[in-house]
Image (cartoon, helix red, strand yellow):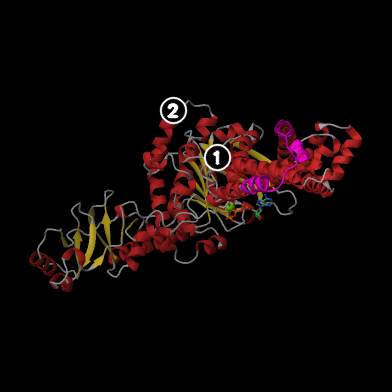
Amino acid sequence: MTARTPAAAPGLFRRVRSSMSDPEGGWIGLVITPVMALILLGTMLWVWNTADIDQTTRNILEGSKLRGQFQEHLFMAAWSTVFVIGIAVPLGILLTRPRFKRFATPVLTFASSGQAIPAYGLLILFFTWIGTGPWTSIYAFTLYAILPVLRNTIVGLEQVDDAVIEAGRGMGMTKLEALRKIELPLSVPVILAGIRTALVINIGMAALAVFIGGGGLGETINSGLKLRRDVATFMGAGIVAMLALVVDWLAALAERYLRPRGV
Amino acid sequence: MSQAHASAETATAEALIHLDAVTKVYAGTEAPAVDRLTLDVPEGEILILVGPSGCGKSTTLRLINRMIEPTSGRIVFEGEDVTDVNPDQLRRRIGYVIQQIGLFPHRTIAENIGTVPQLLGWDKTRISGRVDELLEMVGMEPHLYRDRYPKELSGGQAQRVGVARALGADPDVLLMDEPFGAIDPITRDRLQNEFLRLQAELRKTIVFVTHDIDEAIKMGDRIAILGDSSAIAQLDTPERILAQPANEFVEDFLGGGATLKGLNLRRVREIEVAEGYPVIRPDTSREQALAALRSSDEDFLLLLDAEGSPTRWLDEDNITDPATALGASGLPVRVTVEPEDTLADALEFMLQSAHGTACVVDSHGRFDGMIRLETIMGEIASMQRAAREASAERKRKGAS
Ligand SMILES: Nc1ncnc2c1ncn2[C@@H]1O[C@H](COP(=O)(O)OP(=O)(O)OP(=O)(O)O)[C@@H](O)[C@H]1O
Ligand SMILES: [Mg+2]
């Protein structure tokens, strides 16, 4: 039948498919974070220029010290995130396979309860068990940040349209091929969002490492508190916050870039 | 029931797919979704599975390509028992269009269509050539569509891509689960016609699921009407099912108006179109137009465009009204029928138009002639006569 009615024009029947909601809500999200970082930076500069800075404060905030702490901080956050990804993503994949599906809820419950322990308590627990040093903190943070990545991996894989998987399997993809070519690419945005959360958690948590001799920017904060140098405390906290904002922003960019086209 | 048996015997000779007492009981359910189904799919034919929702049509298809494992029974494919072969390898030989289309949203149209060739390890140039060929085949211009993503397609286009994807590696067998469901009737009709045209060339062995009896009659070489648990109520050609429903269930399923349904079997090209309908072209003057209309018995003139496609209906008032140009007065021609359309389609569009006629156009959209309501009424009358004679014949045979 050749139709001349406008109703048959392609486009009017365009399927409305709710695209996975952009966690950033468009470009605004990418702008807000730098603006916040700039405000924070401005405040820090203003404090530095107006407050009266004594020698103790200068000692605490000495450039080479800060650089070392900064590196330790990043080191801990990066490694714990790597471990989190290495554990949570495969575990999430396993827990969405038919055979292990029934363990998903218990494991998630367990992981949530792990997060209910105060972070500091968890750190002390690991300290008494493994001893002092950055790696102890890395293990503790890993455990602490597994939940968001695990949860998002499971949710991400489960929200993939069954019809799409059935189509792939129906055309002869093996289970592994369907996972690799369909399920994982389609859950990338959700998994990345979880990883981003874990990164930010880990950057914040790394400030606690100082209490078990793990180093990091927590040292500056701690010294500031102990020696009652509020400016130093503020600067230490400010740098941690800046770091979290910048990393969060970079991760948001990565999310955008790595999101598969077409979804 | 005798009907089903008789035709099953005639069909076995060159069955490409053979189901032997296949049963499926889903885990956690009591009643089987498919109960001891024995079915032959002859080579090069479209076998339609039609039946009420939930009767096990999709389950049957998924048993054939082993998306689900049968609880019992045997599946023979091209003479080989495939009940235990590697299902992934088997599926690469069988095209599958699922009920929900299921295009991969993160892959371009070209990548979607190239899925099976890619799994089979074809090289890039061969895949890309094949993709273009298939897009052409389903009537979509490759350069416009190959790099799009599924969300950038209309529903009808997505269905076409679903079919093209199933044809990817040129399988001999296609399983199609309501491939033209969930689209508007006009687009659906067009897709059905295109698909039939395609099938005339390709001669694939097709199992086609639908719950629409009209679609079944139109598309099927053979129709299996299924009841609960995929029990075959009747399996026969559309003509025979319409003429001789095997039992009450089939009659109910066919619904009223078997003759009207029979119109789904007849094509516009098979009947004579009225020639000599008064038409005018863009360069015709008002006087000539008026003369043409008056010298005919019609109330309307048909205005063709420069290519010869019908564009507007004009009556005498439209022609004589000096305020409007001929090209802008009267009523637009909304729908035309093509030779491949069924008489059921033609009738439906005639009833929608005020004229009791439908313009027939050729495949380029050029005006070919007119079908009138009376012509179709004549067809109906002769079909009813044929049905009466057939049933009289049956009675005579039964008596002797
Ligand atoms: N995975 C499953 N697990 C359990 N029961 C199922 C499953 N899939 C289908 N069924 C049941 O099996 C029966 C047949 O389902 P099937 O999908 O084959 O029906 P259908 O004829 O294709 O229906 P429709 O026309 O609605 O698509 C239904 O009663 C359905 O509820
Ligand atoms: Mg179904």
Please give the chain letter of the residue carrying mark 1: A
Residue A5 seen in render:
yes
Whether A58 is among the magenta residues is yes
| Residue receiving disc 1 | A257
Q: Residues within 10 Å of mark 2 (few under 14, many from 20)?
A: few
Looking at the image, which residue is at 34% across and 68% down?
B351
The kind of residue tagged 2 is Arg
- Secondary-structure class at tag 1: helix
Residue A152, how many percent across, how many down?
A: 69, 46
Mark 2 residue element: helix
Question: What range of the chain is rendered magenta?
Answer: A41-70
For residue B42, above or below residue B361 = above
Rendering coords of residue B148 (x, y %) = 44, 43
In terms of depth relative to the viewer, which is nearer, B37 or A116?
A: A116
Crowding at dot 1, Cα within 10 Å, few <14 / some 14-19 / many 20+, comes out as: few
Q: Is residue A174 above or below residue A152?
A: above
The main secondary structure of the magenta stretch is helix
> Camera-side residue: A234 or B43?
A234
| A159 relative to B6 in the view: left or right | right
| Corner quadrant of residue A167 | top right
Q: Which residue is mark 2?
A: B126
Residue B356 placement: quadrant? bottom left
* Image vertical order of residue B210 relative to residue B207, above or below: below
